[in-house]
């Protein structure tokens, strides 16, 4: 993936205010639909305050497309002009995000390879400093064209890393294991540019009511929680059908 410094998107424009407000209601209702569960379940998501929440598949939800489609976006894979986009909001301390990465992400990447899907990752930090550091590290890896490799390494085996595994020392070591320029990675990890990029993504997520992860927008259709792969395939098919008429 080519790397360019990510441009700060001007996505919070007046023409989107009503749509964003609508989606905020949709996501808030989805996130609060059920009481907290005690363990992983299909469709569950992680919250910083109350753990897992099982969520049902949304039906005929309002859509808002926040895909940026920036050429050279270091946190995106797939053609800029792909007919379908998937925006992924996740946290590196979220076990359900790790599960989605190992179970459903491969199926989505197949559609990236076919040219039909573009995935844009928004690494957010709802669980505090370790999550923030991991998001900044993944962004720093993206500036060397290795975002996806780093992302998958952090979620290896469908598991999240321990807090120790998200220390600066561990993240720098991982960069070395992946063959990155460690000096450049370390500089970028600590840079204001990378911090600003992560903050932009966190602000975007907060503005549409994403306080639980994982959460997704499939060409604007909200999907909340690590639902079965079939749910994402069906959402992809719906989005593609809308484009193809």
Image: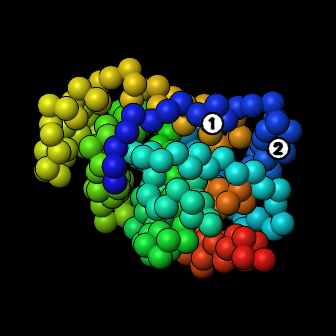
Measured as percent of width and height from the top left, residue 223 is found at 67, 60
Q: How is the image coloured?
A: rainbow
Nearer to me, 49 or 194: 194
Q: Can residue 194 be spotted in the picture?
A: yes
**Where on the picture, by quarter, is residue 241?**
bottom right
Report whether 62 appears left or right of 149: right
Residue at image point 31% right, 65% down: 157
Q: Dot 1: what SS?
A: helix
The quadrant of the rendering that contains the N terminus is bottom left
Residue at image point 84% right, 66% down: 60
The 10 Å Cα crowd at callout 2, few under 14, some 14 to 19, many 20 or more, is some
Name the residue tied to disc 1.
204
| Above or below for 15 versus 159 | above
Residue at image point 79% right, 38% down: 16
Report whether 82 appears left or right of 17: left
Mark-to-mark CA distance, 1 and 2: 13 Å
Report whether 114 appears left or right of 16: left
The 10 Å Cα crowd at callout 1, few under 14, some 14 to 19, many 20 or more, is some
Name the residue tied to disc 2.
19
Nearer to me, 35 or 162: 162
Residue at image point 54% right, 36% down: 201
Instruction: Report the residue that reaches farthest toward the top.
Output: 192
């Amino acid at each position: 993936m080519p790397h360019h410094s990510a441009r700060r998107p001007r996505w919070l424009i007046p023409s989107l205010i009503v749509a964003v407000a609508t989606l905020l209601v949709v996501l808030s209702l989805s996130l609060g639909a059920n009481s907290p569960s005690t363990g992983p379940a299909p469709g569950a998501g992680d919250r910083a305050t109350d753990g897992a929440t099982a969520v049902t598949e949304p039906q005929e939800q309002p859509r808002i497309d926040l895909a940026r489609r920036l050429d050279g976006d270091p946190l995106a894979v797939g053609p800029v002009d792909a007919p379908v986009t998937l925006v992924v909001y996740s946290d590196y301390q979220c076990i359900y995000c790790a599960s989605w990465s190992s179970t459903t992400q491969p199926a989505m990447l197949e559609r990236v390879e076919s040219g039909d899907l573009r995935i844009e990752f928004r690494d957010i930090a709802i669980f505090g400093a370790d999550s923030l550091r991991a998001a900044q590290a993944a962004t720093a890896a993206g500036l060397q064209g290795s975002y996806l490799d780093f992302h998958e390494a952090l979620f290896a085996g469908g598991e999240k890393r321990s807090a120790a595994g998200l220390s600066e020392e561990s993240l720098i070591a991982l960069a070395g294991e992946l063959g990155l320029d460690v000096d450049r990675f370390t500089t970028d990890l600590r840079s204001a540019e990378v911090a600003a990029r992560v903050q932009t993504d966190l602000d975007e997520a907060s503005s549409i009511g994403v306080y639980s992860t994982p959460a997704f927008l499939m060409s604007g259709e909200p999907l909340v929680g690590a639902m079965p792969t079939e749910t994402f395939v069906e959402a992809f098919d719906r989005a593609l059908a809308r484009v193809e008429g």
